Image (cartoon, rainbow, N blue to C red):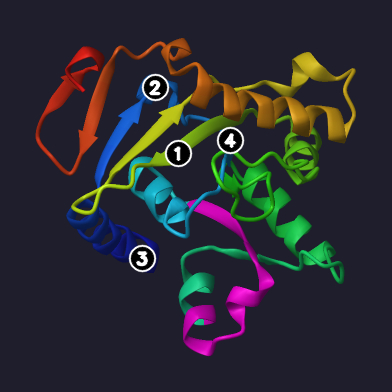
Amino acid sequence: MLYESFKVLAKLVISSQFKVIIKGKENLSLDQPVVIASNHVSGYDPIVLSCVIDGEIHFLAKKELFKNRLLRWLLTNINAIPVDRHGGNVIRPVRKGLRVLNEGGLLGVFPEGTRCKSDQVVQPKKGVAFFSFKTATPVLPIYITYDQRRYRPIVKVNIGEAIDPIHYQDLDYSGFASLVMESVMELKSNPSNANDRTEVVFGENQQKGINDL
């Protein structure tokens, strides 16, 4: 219940602060569990994705965010799963993530493990591969960009085709994680690869073709 209330509020805030353009929305066929894998450039990323994607997303979030009591209460009630990035106990978040997928839910992962600049290249974490392989769950690659204009910056959310782990059983976790991250980054360099030929503007009752942008 709280998640839905948060989502309504988030949509109001995001639509007032940004102009969100979604590409590849036809790839959001969420009739099965999915690992959502996105690049991470802003603290707004999980909020934007929650507004764009139907259903409740359980995001893996760094443990440090849960130190504040109020923020911990909010994050817990909107399904965030705390993860210790510096070691420690990983059994609990792993179990929670596996349970989300085994119950047909949506698990949100940022393979880079932290916020990175758009031109920054880092070795992806293996978690995205672990959850996908262990539950035979497809991974949905997404690339998010923000422009730098002052008033209502444009946020582009480019959604790629799902990656089915069954076709990559010859790869280890590191190899599959790299493949997922490459698929995410390809959405930045080759946005025309997405099948959707229209851009859906979130927060406005209109659609624009690619050539109109």
Marks 4 & 3, CB-CB < 8 Å contact: no
Q: Amino acid at mark 3?
A: Met
Structural distance between the alpha carbons of marks 4 and 1: 18 Å
Q: Position of residue 19 (x, y in %)?
A: 22, 43
Identity, as a three-letter code, of the amino acid under mark 2: Gly
Foreground disc of the pair 3, 2 = 2
Q: Residues within 10 Å of mark 3 (few under 14, many from 20)?
A: few
Relative horizontal placement of residue 107, taking residue 127 as reference (left or right): left
Mark 4 lies on residue: 34
- Looking at the picture, tell me which residue is in the foreground, 84 or 79: 84
153 is higher (above) or lower (below) than 187: below
Q: Nearer the viewer, mark 3 or mark 1?
A: 1
Q: Secondary structure at mark 3?
A: loop
Q: Earlier in the sequence, mark 4 or mark 2?
A: 2
Residue occupying the far left of the picture: 205
| Figure quadrant of residue 2 | bottom left
Residue 212 coordinates in the image, percent (x, y): 17, 18
Amino acid found under the numbered disc labelled 4: Val
Contact (Cβ within 8 Å) of mark 4 with mark 1? no
The picture places residue 164, in percent across and down from the top left corner, at: 68, 21
